Amino acid sequence: MSAVKAKRGRPTGSGINDRIWLRELGRLIRLDPARKPTAAIKALGITDPSTIRRIRDKHKRMMPQPGV
């Protein structure tokens, strides 16, 4: 028998390719570093709250962590 337990709950990741949105989000933030990611996402014309959250979370995972 395997000692690995099955993970519970929803699997991580949506499988949706947001590469284009993430590239544009990075461009907007580089142009105006004071802009928050959520405001930049809304400036791209995205209004669906779940899409905003998904892109914001992916952007946060891609950013280098301070002090590492």
Image (spheres, rainbow, N blue to C red):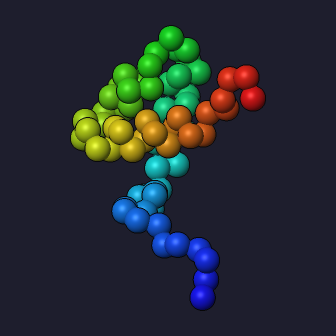
Whether residue 54 is visible, yes or no, is: yes
Does 1 sit above or below residue 29?
Answer: below
Front residue of this view, candidates 21 and 11: 11
- Residue 20: x and y, percent? 50, 46
Whether residue 22 is visible, yes or no, is: no
**Residue farthest toward the left in the current orientation of the protein:** 48
Does 53 sit above or below residue 28?
Answer: below
- Residue 6: x and y, percent? 48, 73
Dividing the picture into quarters, in which one does residue 63 lie? Answer: top right
Does 49 sit above or below residue 16?
Answer: above
Dividing the picture into quarters, in which one does residue 43 lie? Answer: top left
Would residue 7 appear left or right of 62 to someone viewing this image? left
Q: Could you tell me which residue is drawn at 60 percent across and 88 percent down? A: 1
Front residue of this view, candidates 36 and 43: 36
**Residue farthest toward the top in the current orientation of the protein:** 34
**Which quadrant is home to the C terminus?**
top right
